[in-house]
Amino acid sequence: MLDYVSLQSNYFAMISTEITLPCGAIIKNRLVKSAMTERISNKRFEPTQGHQLLYQNWSDTGAGLLITGNVVVDRKHLESAGNVCFDDEKKLSKIQPWAHAAKSNGNHVWVQISHSGRQANKFSTTRPLAPSSIQLKKMGLFGKPKAMTETQIQDVIQAFVRAAKISKRAGFTGVQIHAAHGYLLSQFLSPSTNVRTDQWGGSIENRSRLLISILREVRKEVGDDFPISVKLNSADFQRGGFTEEESLEVVKMLDKEKIDLLEISGGTYEKLAFFLMNEEGAEIRESTKKREAYFIDFARKVRTVSNLPLMITGGFRSYDFCNEVLENGEVDLIGMARPFITNREDISGFLMGEVPILKNFVLRTGIKQFEDAAEGGFYARQLIRFSKGKKLKPNMNPLWCSMFLILYEFKKAMIKKFF
């Protein structure tokens, strides 16, 4: 194991051992609730009592680290109409109770900060900013973007810095810079969405410049002992997009920046990684699916070029397998998202080895074009229920779930616009 990873205890499985990050922060165990968009802000883009309840309950699971859903740096570029926006320090009194509730069991809680770029839907803006004027064409929900000017790029850098400053002052224990899943920083990294010819486009070094610039400025703001994580795509899974080879080059750059955790994911709105597709559109090989974790093969490649603490999210479900990859040094932290919804009551037992498997919940409409929307709607509805103190409702109508997000986005957008 690497020098920043604590030795396995004689009394606990690896998942229950603590880890010391490069900045000196200690996380009490290796299980992480990865980011999931909550969609429950008020009309002023502030967190609500629903955030406090959600995160208090997740803190009670015993997980060592909770990462929030998208907290945007620009209210004109929302990922969802229910996003929280950290753009004004006057909001601190509204934000602090969320942080306090979320870390109530001695766990870490980090803010995932992001900018949606061209993935800001039309309910947010009809002319989003992006590296280049290349439109996201999916269900007619996204406007034609405007290529960013130098001034606008510098403004985005400062917006990330401001959000990180607010996160620390509010009492959160770290931040995660979202450079995956097709959001703005991912758009700059990808040659399919970044065709600029200036210092922000072209070579992978230029396309990485915005991410690296943000990291350096955020580090200056928060100091050396405050955890900074990056979420990075292994690939876009699209022809002409961000490739594994380019991702490894970015990892090498991140290694020099001394970030505290690298989370590997993949895909964009146009190609969702969790439907198990690779760049050529073929299924990921069976051996990877049997080993549960979608990105474990890429994680091994990362290990050859970087000593950064590493986490992957997606597919982990069995206690034995989680401990296997941790003990083998393939990853340092285990990221889970949906199990913190469908299996929330089992997480504490899972950490203690009393629950050997967190069973998958599969929702299907029978109509291929609706499947991703149905799953997204199902999990969004469950989070909203949890924020109101309600329990999991597994028997939701799949077709209604497939329509939910669009209707909910429209409703939330109209409330914020007219009330």
Image (cartoon, grey):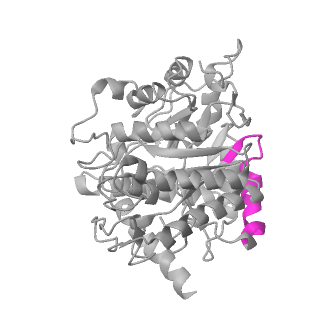
Q: Position of residue 184 (x, y in %)?
A: 44, 60
Q: Is residue 347 left or right of residue 76?
A: right
Front in this rendered view, residue 230 or 386: 230
Q: Position of residue 196 (x, y in %)?
A: 34, 62
Task: Say whether residue 293 is visible.
Answer: no
Quadrant of the drawing holding the N terminus: top right
Q: Position of residue 60 (x, y in %)?
A: 71, 42
Q: Is residue 238 left or right of residue 164?
A: left
- Give the image quarter of residue 377: bottom left
Q: Position of residue 309 (x, y in %)?
A: 58, 32
Task: Say whether residue 260 is visible.
Answer: yes
Q: Is residue 107 left or right of residue 273?
A: right
Q: Residue at x 74, y 42 (%)?
A: 225
State the residue lying farthest toward the front.
Answer: 198
Q: Residue at x 55, y 28 (%)?
A: 307
Q: Which residues are magenta?
A: 91-109
Residue 383 magenta-drawn?
no
Specify the principal SS of the magenta part.
helix
Residue 106 magenta-drawn?
yes
Quadrant of the drawing holding the C terminus: bottom right
Q: Is residue 264 above or below residue 287?
A: below
Q: Is residue 45 above or below residue 227?
A: below
- Give the image quarter of residue 165: bottom right
Q: Residue at x 64, y 54 (%)?
A: 218
